[in-house]
Amino acid sequence: MQSLKEKIISEGRVISDGVLKVDSFLNHQIDPQLTFDMGKEFASYFKNKNVTKVLTLESSGIPPALTTAMELGVPMVFAKKQKPMTMKGDVWVERVFSFTKQIENEIHIGKSFLSTDDKVLIIDDFLAHGEAALGLASIVKQAGAEVVGIGIVIEKSFQEGGRKLKDAGFDVLSLARIKSLTNHTVEFIED
Amino acid sequence: MQSLKEKIISEGRVISDGVLKVDSFLNHQIDPQLTFDMGKEFASYFKNKNVTKVLTLESSGIPPALTTAMELGVPMVFAKKQKPMTMKGDVWVERVFSFTKQIENEIHIGKSFLSTDDKVLIIDDFLAHGEAALGLASIVKQAGAEVVGIGIVIEKSFQEGGRKLKDAGFDVLSLARIKSLTNHTVEFIED
């Protein structure tokens, strides 16, 4: 997605060989127009998959998941990192390891929001080691529903998440795939 | 906002005299079309305020804040409950007491995302005791920027948040104002 790549070049900051900071448009401040264009890209690619629900993980996944769900005309669900006090009992739980923070988090989805008929499109802002996407996919499977695709805004292709998701048989669309962040320079994999 | 009130009646669940559960369309699963209509309502009401930025608090504030920002053509910023590891130094911090959880949380906004020129519209999903909105407003003030309005999806008018925000001089628009939740029944304040 050309406009996204241009935004990464103009506003992204390479913090280290592994960390790209994009909080001026994706993780903290959000560019609404770009987010809507991301939604259109995801919706266009997955439009023949009969998606019934878009699923993401709070918080940075919410904007692109919402615009994708809007474009597809289906509900969006975001998994929660903390179990809400009003969400008693029937909750799917999965453990997700965060390499960035080096801790294991639980993610939660109310059982009433995934049914065996659901065809789920998972959307997330970043793909690095693949833990979040795999954790969401595991909950979809527990619910007896089907993952019909995974949409990622920025894939750090030099880490193993993309390969793990494809090896597991998922149809993955990444809007920008980063080959390398060495020498404080963003290098993309060209499509 | 009539469609919101109808959704609250059809899908909201009164858990107690103080708690309304709306996680099928606002807090966990999101109804994209309704969220876009909320954005249009907020944008229409505040359109003459020269808003330069929409501000909210993760996570449930993000969907209506995004659609409002889209409609107004300005960026959206969401305050974070945890200080991100890549957000070093220059961060505004405020303490916000959560009555629901009976704990004090810190909220964080990167200093680069609020400037003295900003006219900020605060958006949040719920207004109860007003702590979150006042915490966000306090950060806007610290940054030397101006709060030009506060938009709330659901105001629990039987709690003191609405009065506190109006007493502080803020222009508040609540899309649905709830007078009472007693007898497991939602009673609205009619406009």
Image (cartoon, coloured by chain):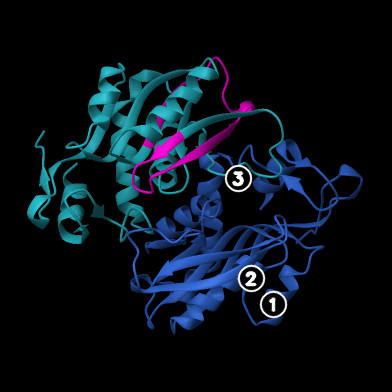
Chain colours: A blue, B cyan
Against A98, residue A137 (above or below) is below
> Residue A93 in the image: x percent, y percent?
49, 72
Is disc 1 surrounded by few (<14), some (14 to 19) or many (20+) residues within 10 Å?
Answer: few
For mark 3, what is the residue?
A: A26
For mark 1, what is the residue?
A: A166
Against B74, residue A168 (above or below) is below
- Residue at figure coordinates x 56%, y 35% from the top left: B108
Magenta residues, start to end: B96-123
For mark 2, what is the residue?
A: A172
Mark 2 or mark 3: name the one nearer the start of the chain: 3
- Residue at figure coordinates x 23%, y 25% from the top left: B163
In the rendered structure, are the residues bearing label 2 and label 3 in contact, judged by CB atoms less than 8 Å apart?
Answer: no
| Marks 2 & 3 on one chain | yes
* Amino acid at circle 2: Val
* Amino acid at circle 3: Leu
The reply to whether the magenta stretch includes residue A127 is no
The reply to whether the magenta stretch includes residue B112 is yes
